[in-house]
Image: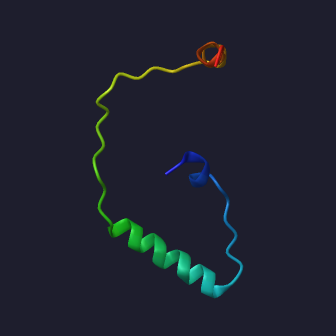
Amino acid sequence: MATKSILKNIVVDNDAAAESLAEALEHAQNKGHVHVSIRRKVHEVKGSSIKRMFEGR
């Protein structure tokens, strides 16, 4: 899941929406998760490096 979607504000403006949200959260809490392992070496790339990567394309 993208971080941006986690950080969004939601508005619950009626009882039906509140109940639906509560049920969804309870369902998600009981759901399992998958362990993810990173198999490749990663490093952070700054903006200037990205520009150099795509120069000449």
Residue drawn at (28%, 47%), measured in percent from left and top?
A: 35
Query: Is residue 23 found left or right of 12 in the rendered image?
Result: left
Residue drawn at (54%, 48%), measured in percent from left and top?
A: 2
**Which image quadrant for residue 42?**
top left
In this view, the residue farthest toward the bottom is 16
Query: Is residue 8 found left or right of 23 in the rendered image?
Result: right
User: Is 1 drawn above or below residue 52 in the view shown?
Assistant: below
User: Is 24 drawn above or below residue 2 in the view shown?
Assistant: below
User: Is 42 drawn above or below residue 37 in the view shown?
Assistant: above
In this view, the residue farthest toward the front is 57
Q: Position of residue 46 (x, y in %)?
A: 61, 18
**Which image quadrant for residue 39?**
top left
Residue drawn at (69%, 84%), measured in percent from left and top?
A: 14
For the C terminus, the image quarter is top right
Task: Please name the colour scheme applied to the rendered image.
Answer: rainbow
Q: Position of residue 40 (x, y in %)?
A: 32, 26
Residue drawn at (54%, 75%), measured in percent from left and top?
A: 21
The residue nearer to you, when weighing 40 against 4, is 40
The residue nearer to you, when weighing 37 against 11, is 37
How many callouts does the rendering have? 0
The residue nearer to you, when weighing 48 against 56, is 56
